[in-house]
Image (cartoon, grey):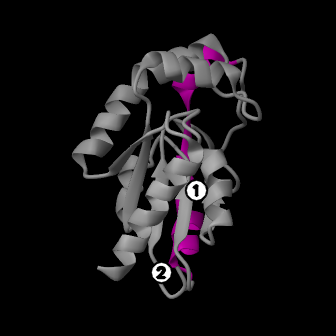
Amino acid sequence: MEGFRGKYLVTGTAGTGKTTLEKLLAQRGFETNDIDYGFAGWYDRATMQPTSYNPDGGAEWLGLNTFRLHLPLVKEHIAKQRDIPLIMLGHTGDVYDQRALFDGVFVLEYPNDDLLRHRLLTRDGNPYGKHPDELAKELAYYGAFQDKFRAAGAVMIDCSLPSERIATIISERIAADSIE
């Protein structure tokens, strides 16, 4: 990977395994960043002012707020010179609009509603999606999200595959990009 300076995005709706992949890809020698930590946050839709996540806010709160990239920080970070590929992993309401910032985009996709429901309700470390309104929002949203990225030419990866296999698919694709 040394000498190649590509910038990649791995995205997918809640619970697709982005946090697990971040660790696996870092172990393989990539520079990785989880967008949830410092590169994105919740914003009031009307004022675009930062707000705090309210896991008990329900549908009303979700309608008034959005999770967005801290775009100046993201642009500054990806503009830095580096000798290894950068992979940013995460999902925000505006990530599709910013896909052109990256040399390649990978989307972790759910094959069905049951897997999405199971992953969100049983995952540890992130409460998002456990509230019934958040779960309903994700179930209503993920298909269109995946279709939009597929139409834009993103590399689609079934998130039900083992995490090590997904990391291999991404690593091999980035390695192939570096020799083209």
Q: Which residue is mark 1?
A: 70
Instruction: Say which of 165 and 152 sits in front.
Output: 165
Which mark identifies residue 51? none
Neighbourhood count class around disc 2 (C-alpha, 10 Å): few under 14, some 14–19, many 20 upward: some
Main SS, magenta region, reads: helix
Q: How many marks?
A: 2
Give the magenta-colored segment's residue range: 57-80
The reply to whether residue 48 is in sight is: no
Residue 90 % position (x, y): 56, 48
Would you say 145 lies left or right of 77 here? Answer: left
Kind of residue at disc 1: His
Image quadrant where residue 58 sits: top right
Amino acid on which disc 2 is placed: Arg
Which residue is rendered at x = 22% and y = 44% of the image?
Answer: 151
Q: Nearer the viewer, residue 168 or 34?
A: 168
Image coords of residue 138 (percent x, y):
49, 23
Which residue sits at x=77%, y=35%? Answer: 125
* Mark earlier in primary sequence (1, 2): 2
Q: Are marks 1 and 2 in contact (CB under 8 Å)?
A: no
55 inside magenta stretch: no
Residue 74, located in which quarter of the rendered image? bottom right
Q: Secondary structure at mark 2?
A: loop
Question: Is label 1 in a helix, a strand or a loop?
Answer: loop
Q: Residue at x 52, y 44 (%)?
A: 91
Residue 10: where, in percent of width, then height? 49, 53
Residue 177 is drawn in which quadrant?
bottom left
Farthest left residue in view: 151
Q: Which residue is mark 2?
A: 5
Going 54% across and 64% down the picture, which residue do you hit?
87
Q: Is residue 113 visible?
A: yes
Q: What is the C-alpha distance between the residues marked 1 and 2?
A: 22 Å
Query: Callout 1 environment at 10 Å: few (<14), some (14 to 19), or many (20+)?
Result: some
